[in-house]
């Protein structure tokens, strides 16, 4: 046995990287293509082998858009072991009618977004405001995540705190809400400077990038500027590691909230 990666598998690695590319541009793939009335197909794929990856090795997969034409996009990729390039690849994608599968011009919105993304420019925008301003976008996203995905009762999702909170909603280039959170300031004067983060939610198809981290950082910056010294939150156990990486530490024992195991976590600002 050669004990090396089967050559066609490298195309699968690039395909996985392409899926992550869409998440990093904050574009939910299926909804975006439906919005743009098109689909994307592989026209051509080529690989150049410089070395072999072995079983159980850790690899880095890189992918970038090299050129955008009228109806096609050229992506170049690299698969590396540390800094050694094992495989170089080129993939040509064609934007096409989703039914007839005939090529059509790439929408200007998509061209502009990818161009900005590749240039390292901002591709999302954050809105901060009251519940009266952001309710529809924030609540719609929260219901998708907490009610439909996690089974939280609908009548528990919107509560009396919403009208008292500062809300944060992150939008992508197509103005779709992709992440949200709220900041509660306790009315108890003895708890002055201690605020609570709640209702953190990120679209399921865009997790695995940094959008949750982006919203949480905005919440912390807002709290710090208004003089808060401590932030607390009720973290679902499956999200505990995420908050730990952002500097939050567990406080007390686990408890159940809306039928889901949680733990309180805090961060000093």
Image: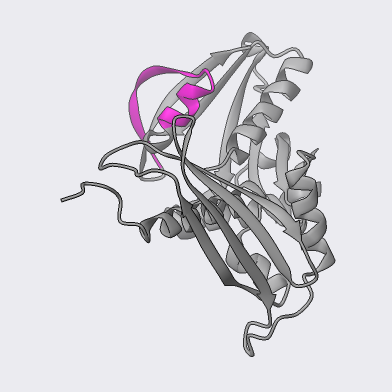
Residue 245 inside the magenta-drawn segment: yes
Instruction: Tell whether 159 sits left or right of 107.
Output: left
Residue drawn 65% across the image and 34% down it: 214
Using the image as rendered, state which of residue 217 and residue 93 is in the foreground: 93
Instruction: Tell whether 166 sits left or right of 213.
Output: right
Res. 39 visible in picture: yes
Quarter occupied by the C terminus: top right
Q: Position of residue 96 (x, y in %)?
A: 68, 79
Residue drawn 76% across the image and 48% down it: 134
Count of marks placed on residues: 0
Q: Position of residue 109 (x, y in %)?
A: 81, 62
Q: Position of residue 37 (x, y in %)?
A: 71, 77
The single residue placed furthest to the bottom in the displayed view is 100
Residue drawn 58% across the image and 61% down it: 91
Res. 129 visible in picture: no
**Colour approach in the figure:** one colour
Residue 73 lies in quadrant: bottom right
Using the image as rendered, state which of residue 191 and residue 62 is in the foreground: 62
Residue 210 lies in quadrant: top right
Residue 4 inside the magenta-drawn segment: no
Residue 56 lies in quadrant: top left
Vertical order, 55 against 235 (above or below) = below
Vertical order, 252 against 1 (above or below) = above
Instruction: Tell whether 169 sits left or right of 202.
Output: right
Query: What segment is highlighted magenta in the picture?
Result: 240-257
Vertical order, 49 against 110 (above or below) = above
Q: Position of residue 54 (x, y in %)?
A: 28, 42
Residue drawn 54% across the image and 23% down it: 246
């Amino acid at each position: 046995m050669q004990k090396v990666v089967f050559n066609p598998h490298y195309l699968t690695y690039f395909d996985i990287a392409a899926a992550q590319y869409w998440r990093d541009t904050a574009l939910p793939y299926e909804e975006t293509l439906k919005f743009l009335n098109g689909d994307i197909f592989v026209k051509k794929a080529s690989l150049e082998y410089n070395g072999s990856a072995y079983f159980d090795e850790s690899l880095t997969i890189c992918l970038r858009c090299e050129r955008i034409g009228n109806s096609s996009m050229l992506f170049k990729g690299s698969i590396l072991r540390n800094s050694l390039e094992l495989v170089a690849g080129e993939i040509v994608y064609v934007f096409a009618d989703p039914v007839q599968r005939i090529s059509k011009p790439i929408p200007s919105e998509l061209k502009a977004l990818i161009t900005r993304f590749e240039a390292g420019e901002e591709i999302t925008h954050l809105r901060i405001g009251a519940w009266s301003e952001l309710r529809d976008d924030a609540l719609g996203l929260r219901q998708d995540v907490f009610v439909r995905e996690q089974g939280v009762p609908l009548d528990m999702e919107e509560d009396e705190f919403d009208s008292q909170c500062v809300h944060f909603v992150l939008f992508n280039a197509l103005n779709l809400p992709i992440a949200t959170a709220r900041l509660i300031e306790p009315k108890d004067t003895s708890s002055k400077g201690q605020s609570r983060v709640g209702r953190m939610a990120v679209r399921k198809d865009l997790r695995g990038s940094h959008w949750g981290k982006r919203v949480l950082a905005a919440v912390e910056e807002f709290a710090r500027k208004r003089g808060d010294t401590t932030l607390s939150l009720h973290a679902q156990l499956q999200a505990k590691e995420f908050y730990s990486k952002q500097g939050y530490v567990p406080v007390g024992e686990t408890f159940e909230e809306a039928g889901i195991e949680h733990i309180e976590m805090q961060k000093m600002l």
